[in-house]
Amino acid sequence: KETGGYLTDCKITEMESDKNQQKENLQSTDRDLSEQIKTVTKDSHVRAENTELMLSYQRGQITLPQYKLLLCSLYEIYKALEEELDRNSSHPSVAPIYFPQELARLEALERDLEYLLGQNWRERVIVPAATHRYAQRLRQIGGENPILLVAHAYTRYLGDLSGGQVLGRITQKSMGLRNGEGLSFFSFPGVTSPHRFKQLYRSRMNSIELTEEQREGVLQEAVRAFEFNIEVFDDLQKMLRATETDTKEQRRPAPDSARDAAH
Ligand code: HEM
């Protein structure tokens, strides 16, 4: 898999962003896709941060069952996302934001799942309905309208390189994981500076040529991408609550009739 050479690109982008900074003083950059996508997803980001799962995270109260289930869903999501990005890597809208060496998460997720669920992890992966729907959408647009993959790649990868970095540190502390084991998902060995990489990524997004209609489609899809993530998080919490209730039921003393039957 070929990429444009991140370090070289970063230098170029630094120069480009200096130039953009000068331009910014003269003209607004409201037309930049990276600005527009951030603006249209602002409210959705607040909603995503306020899901029960993300709030547990921010309070440092993430539990091992929560983390395992989250990784299972992320595995399904990145499998679909990265297969579709690979398949469409030379599409003119996808090529500029295609960075498999720096961003790909699938192998990291496989390592984490093997560590946390054991060798037979593939048989133990649980996929909630909302995760299925998200993965299905990714495969559908990968086949029918690959331009929209830009919205999904933005939502996941820039999120992983932003708040995701904090979540990684919380996961490590809350679960006392050592030597990065079970935490590969949060680590981007190919990205030396998340801040500079995000600048590069934004400038690549802004270089994609889109008609007004296509641009509108990408913006709408980004809001949808956040929505899919929120639904996945809510579904995971529902599933965990159901398991907790089941466990409590099992722990509760059996009613007399049941005890009698057991004697
Ligand atoms: C950016 C925090 C959850 C997607 C950011 C930034 C912060 C942040 C501080 C800004 C970084 C910067 O401006 O350089 C958090 C926290 C979260 C959370 C604390 C939950 C506890 C999420 C989720 C998603 C997401 C669930 C999507 C699935 C993004 C994206 C950006 C971002 C796409 C880049 C925005 C841009 O610069 O265009 N996040 N985030 N975040 N986050 Fe989150």
Image (tube, rainbow, N blue to C red):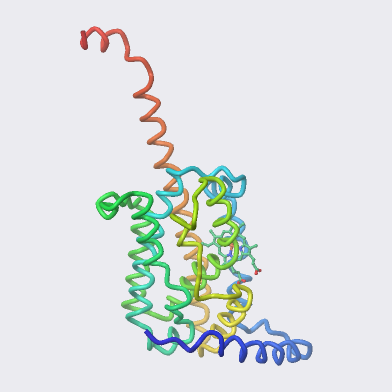
Residue furthest out toward the right: 25
Judge left or right: residue 49 versus residue 21.
left
Viewer-closest of 251 and 44: 251
Q: Residue at x 50, y 62 (%)?
A: 186
Q: Quadrant of the C terminus?
A: top left
Residue 172, compared with residue 25, is above or below; it is above
Q: Quadrant of the N terminus?
A: bottom left
Q: Position of residue 49 (x, y in %)?
A: 59, 54
Q: Position of residue 134 (x, y in %)?
A: 38, 62
Residue 125, compared with residue 106, is above or below; it is above
The number of numbered badges drawn on the structure is: 0
Residue 232, compared with residue 100, is above or below; it is above
User: Which image quadrant is residue 24 in?
Assistant: bottom right
Q: Position of residue 67 (x, y in %)?
A: 45, 49
Q: Residue at x 46, y 80 (%)?
A: 99
Q: Residue at x 58, y 74 (%)?
A: 37
Judge left or right: residue 34 versus residue 250.
right
Q: Residue at x 45, y 45 (%)?
A: 66
Judge left or right: residue 22 versus residue 147.
right
Viewer-closest of 86 and 28: 86
